[in-house]
Amino acid sequence: MQNRSYRGRLAPSPTGFLHPGHLATFLKAASRSRERQGTLLYRMEDLDGARCRLQYDEACLEDLRPFMNWQEGPDIGGPFGPYRQSERLKSGIYHKYWKILRDKGFIYPSPHSRKEIRSHLRDGEDLDTGDILFPQELRRPAADALAFSDPGNTAFRFRVEPQTIEFTDLNLGCVTFQAGQDFGDFLIWSNQGYPSYEFAVVVDDYLMEITEVVRGQDLLLSTARQLLIYRALGWSPPDFYHCSLLRTGDGQRLSKRRGSCTLRSLQERGWTVPALKEACQGSQPNSALIEAISGDF
Ligand code: GLU
């Protein structure tokens, strides 16, 4: 990737207000892009209609603006738009690459109900946390996908063959996963009629010519899955930099779903933009910030 000019991205999902963990990752993405005289784009990952809200879409943009600049995005446009995945869906790009995966035999329809999947789980597996290996008994032949001219509202899964996946992370060094053990067949298309996160992000990072993905370490396993999609489509992947996660004093990750304290609530409690920036971009956890985010838990 060295001979291409650097293109990085910020890719928030507007499912809640941003918290300092997001800010830390985005500040890292912005500084890596700046240091390399690169282009940073902002892509709104708003495919999940049940969880995404316009209110958060606007708030994400507003909350990040004082901290960094991006050169392309939903608010300013650019040559690789649209910059909202919901609009990209309408343009048909995900359908186009879904068809390629179908024709190459990488995916199969998976119209299984949660009840059906649950009845095949092994001890300790929990469908609600997503901590499962998709049951092999439910796997269908890839040829079944050929009966579909369009994914519509049918779920499709990627067939994961047992193999070692190894990549060099620019922060962590060599990372290895065992496909088939660490993760199983995963969703490419949801029964709500849109691509899964794994699939959309690969198509978008490829089409937007992203050269480096900076994201949190909670997405390491997702990166391994995405590498299989890159391979299936015959694309070379970008470089990856996985940031360590900001944790509360008792080691918990911040999460939008758990209502951890947000950039907004910290600012209401007196944290200024420079103070938050300083606290989130240091190499060591900032004790005042840890205390602030732990109290609110
Ligand atoms: N939209 C994803 C999220 O907010 C992150 C996407 C990515 O970095 O690939 O968790």
Image (cartoon, grey):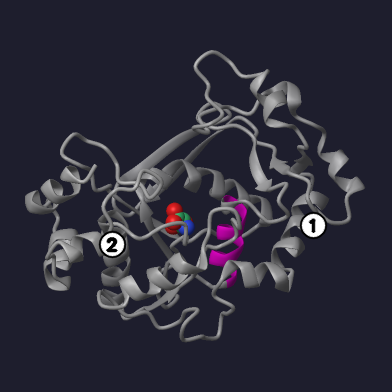
Ligand 1 image-quadrant field: bottom left
**Percent from the top left, x then y, of residue 58?**
44, 73
User: Is residue 190 visible in the rendered structure shown here?
Assistant: yes
Q: Is residue 100 magenta?
A: no
Does residue 72 appear to the left or right of 265 in the view shown? Answer: right
**What is the x, y in percent for residue 253?**
29, 42
The secondary structure that dominates the magenta segment is helix
Q: Could you tell whether 203 is left or right of 257 in the image?
A: right
Figure quadrant of the C terminus: top left
Q: What number is the disc on residue 4?
A: none
Secondary element at tag 1: helix
Residue at the outermost right position: 147
Mark linked to residue 23: 2
Q: Residue 211: in sight, yes or no?
A: no
Q: Quadrant of residue 149?
A: bottom right
Relative to residue 245, is residue 263 depicted above or below? below
Name which residue type carries label 1. Answer: Lys
**Image quadrant where residue 212 sits:** bottom left
Q: Is residue 7 above or below residue 249?
A: below
Q: Nearer the viewer, residue 98 or 289?
A: 289
Looking at the image, residue 27 sits to the left or right of residue 102; the answer is left
Spatial CA distance of label 1 from label 2 is 36 Å
Badges 1 and 2: C-beta atoms under 8 Å apart? Answer: no
Q: Which residues are magenta?
A: 198-207
Residue 99, numbered circle: 1
Q: Amino acid at mark 2?
A: Leu
